[in-house]
Image: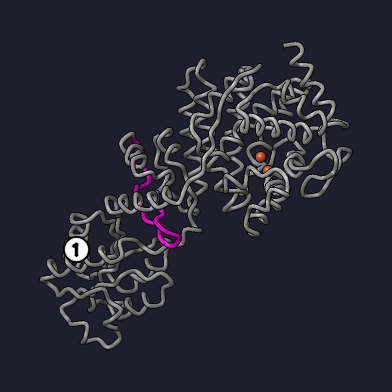
Amino acid sequence: MSALWKANFTCKTDTDNLNLLFSRLFAILAHMTMKVLVVEDEEELREILCFFFESKWDAEVEQAGTGDDAITLLTGPEKFDLVACDYNMPRGNGGKVFQFVQTMAVKPKFILLSSDLPEDHPEIILSEIAGYAPKPLFSAPLESIVQKIMAEAPVAEAAPDLYCRVSVELLHKLNVVPCDLYIKISDQKMIKVMNAGDVFGDVDAEKYQQKKVAYLFIDQKNIDEVVQKLIRAFRQLEKTFDPKQRPPGHIHISEALQGTIHEMATKLGFSAALESLVKANMETALAVIDQNPDLAEILSGAIVDTENYLARHSVLMPFIAAHFAELMEWQSSQTFQKLIIASFLHDATISDDLLAKVQVEAELAAFTPEQAKVWQVHTLLASEIARQFTEIPPDVDQIIAQHHELPDGTGSPNHLNHTRIAPLAALFIIAQDFLLYFENTGSLDLLAFTERREAIYTVGQFKRILVALKKSQARA
Ligand SMILES: [Fe+2]
Ligand SMILES: [Fe+2]
């Protein structure tokens, strides 16, 4: 096995980031969806108002017939951008709704729609309302108020921390919109761009590609449902793979799923949804390994772009680790399962591509103290996540916890020497070393790799594994 394959890994420049921000803004202007609450006790007028918003703007409208009903909706999970509210209503007037809005952490814009002037009601603070449209001739003033709101504040305030990223590539490959999708335009602002149940088609993918938008966002509270939908779509897609083409087809989709695994692990830690996703990805990797694929073909075929380092690294690890396990004659399905799950999770709590390339603590000097901390705890956090998985073979957490230890005891985080590093962890460490060797040199020459590592892997299991790898090349 030898091949020369040059991999170029680049990182984004500031200009790229700026372009990305502008592209996102353009995307937003083209696709803004406004969430509106219409509060009006006269049913016919309420229907007209709803129609008015829906027909003029890309608006999703909820309605309430009393002030109290409006307040109930405002306290619910739905986040409104705008409340268009009558004043004189039974069970809670417009003043009560306005006062409630003032207490909200993220206040929707409030428009008073009434035959009374806002000045007639002292509880309504004029500077705090977005505008006033008199009834019944509300149409023109209402339209200009809404246009002004959109021009001044085109997006709803939201907390991006409550959202998980999902790659445009994954949505496109699976052709699904598993829940409402949002776009992030700054650290404080998110806006909805697609609705649950839409089809994510070529046109959508092309649009985001042109705008250089690689990720959309989903509300964390929908994560379980989203993951189940993604897995179902993934299984459907898998059936369409040509068996001869399967490794490359599988790896690209698996890489896209892996991005979501990293996102969920980083944001939420362990969750049942994360476990389902890892297991789904594992089953597919196992099926590919069963077909005895050519490692060189997988590695060279998988690296077609220079982005997604982390996801690709985690998705390629199972194939190298399983190949090495085979060479050691440790090829039980349990062993493969352990190595695959460890591969998908070992760096799952790191979200920075450059940080994920760090192998020894000394390299952390180039990072901020916060980044260094993330790296220092990543083996522990990821092994904790694995420990909470159910019905998986034992010791996966141990492989993960030890994946930066070294045979001479200089590794991280516990400076374990070779006598305390588990055999499968030793294999995983060497497999990762080989993947990095390939990433850095473009070479898949295993013989050259073993010769370069003879001075490092000199003892115990490490030495035995290196000898087996070398022997396999002598036979080849
Ligand atoms: Fe790591
Ligand atoms: Fe790694």
Residue 135 vs residue 93: left or right?
A: left
Disc 1 target residue: 49
Q: Quadrant of ligand 1?
A: top right
**Start-end of magenta stretch:** 184-201
Quarter of the N terminus within the rendering: top right
Which is more toward the observer, 11 or 20? 11
Disc 1: residue Cβ within 8 A of ligand 1's nearest atom: no
| Outermost residue toward the left in this view | 137
Q: What main secondary structure does the magenta stretch of the protein show?
A: loop
The kind of residue on which mark 1 rests is: Leu
Which residue is painted at 52% across and 21% down in the image? 246
- Render colour scheme: one colour
Is the residue 108 above or below the residue 363 in the image?
A: below
**Whether residue 111 can be seen here:** yes
Could you tell me which secondary element the residue under label 1 belongs to? helix
> Residue 262 placed where, x, y %?
57, 45
Where residue 97 sits, quadrant-wise, is bottom left
Which is more toward the observer, 138 or 1? 1
> Residue 380 placed where, x, y %?
72, 50
Which is more toward the observer, 213 or 447? 447
> Residue 434 placed where, x, y %?
69, 30
